Amino acid sequence: MTNRKIIHIDADAFYASVEMRERPELANQAIAVGGRPEGRGVIATCNYTARKFGVRSAMSSAHALRLCPDLVFIAPNFALYKQVSKQMHEIFQRFTEEIEPLSLDEAYLDVSECSLYQGSATRIAHAIRDAIKRELRLSVSAGIAPNKFLAKIASDWNKPDGQFVIPPSEVDTFVRALPVNKINGVGKVTTQKLKALGIETCQDIRDSDPQQLIKRFGKQGHRLIALSYGLDDRPVQVSRIRKSLSVEHTYDADLNSRDGLIAKLPALLEELDQRLKKSGTKAPIHKRFVKVKFNDFSQTTLEQMISEGKHYASTQEWYEAMLLEAWDRRKLPARLLGLGVRFDQSHHKTMGAQLDLFESKAKG
Ligand code: TTP
Ligand code: MG
């Protein structure tokens, strides 16, 4: 059995919480993010106040309004949710690089190798939730367990704003009592089919005839049996999609003049070019950026869309102009220069597809 330390993070009422943060006057109201009730709109999500009235994701907005007449409807702002999601990931990255995003507000983290907090996954989860609360003013819930299957169930256990740990020693007891409909992928239909066989919990799965389960449910049968023992060896799959590439250099002698800065540019550009060729990245470059670190250790960066910089005759000219503009901000001796590019990931399937899915759902 593979024992990892997995944390599953899931933000609470994600889109609605972001909207409440942006508009504190909404804090005590029932709110829903999604289409207007006059049209054929659907609700993407709602806050916990609205949930008390029975309002749920994917429900028609008109129906939601009947359940909760004071419901405030807010049009979704996907660009903002995407940005917040990125900020959450920046916080995750302080703890591990082994991050698998499931959607904008949900991710698995493998913290088996993280040595912070003496390697205590429970305390790491706490620290992540704390940082998100303090820095982003949002609450997230976390599940901590030896595998992905259990971590995901655990994050739901003390939701909202809570966490739940299933240590390896408690896996067996926890799973035995687990109702089958808590298993990811076991929906209403399967739950009914299992019930007809007298199976309601994972203990019941263990007690039933495995041959019969496999005959009845095929591949899913195999999976159910493994999960009923709490076994799941799927690794956290990091999407190794490169988002940016950069080079930088710290100079022995500080650079004191515009000419001194510009003189360093060709070598940096050459290196960036080499790195780009080596990386084999196919995604188109849509932004370029520069970084200057001054001798008082302050630093500044400047970034521009390629499309905005079209009037420059060459890439070199562009970087020259940007470096000088960045340097002019402080005009102090510079100790480090950096150049980089960002890739356009909009054609990528992962998060983009998730977002499209949500968008079409929200539009109804
Ligand atoms: P969820 O994590 O499923 O829901 P949630 O974060 O709103 O609430 P909680 O986790 O506290 O139960 O989904 C994350 C976001 O995805 C959600 O804020 C809105 C969007 N979404 C949709 O657009 N349509 C849907 O049907 C669902 C389930 C979610
Ligand atoms: Mg959520």
Image: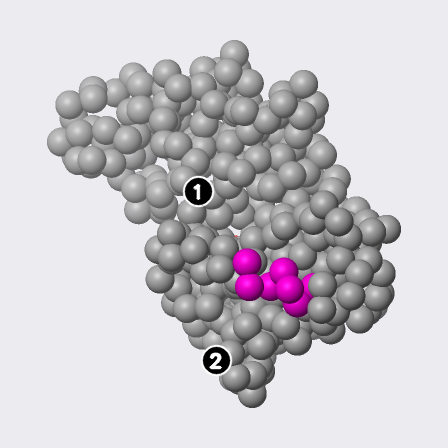
The residue at which mark 2 appears reads as: 40
Quarter-of-image position of residue 221: top left
The residue at which mark 1 appears reads as: 238
Q: Is residue 198 left or right of residue 324?
A: left
Whichever of labels 2 and 1 marks the residue nearer the N terminus, that label is: 2
Marks 2 and 1 sit apart, C-alpha to C-alpha, by: 38 Å
Circle 2 packing at 10 Å, graded few (<14), some (14-19), many (20+), is few
Q: Which mark is residue 75?
A: none
| Badge 1 amino acid | Val
Is residue 13 visible to us here? no
Under circle 2, the secondary element is loop
Nearer to the camera, 174 or 86: 86
Query: Which region is colored magenta?
Result: 261-267
Indicate how the structure is coloured in the image: one colour
At a point 46% along the width and 49% down the height, the residue shown is 102
Nearer to the camera, 357 or 48: 357
Quarter of the image that includes the C terminus? bottom left
Nearer to the camera, 39 or 358: 358
At a point 82% along the width and 69% down the height, the residue shown is 329
| Badge 2 amino acid | Arg
Predominant secondary structure in magenta?
helix
Circle 1 packing at 10 Å, graded few (<14), some (14-19), many (20+), is some
Q: How many marks?
A: 2
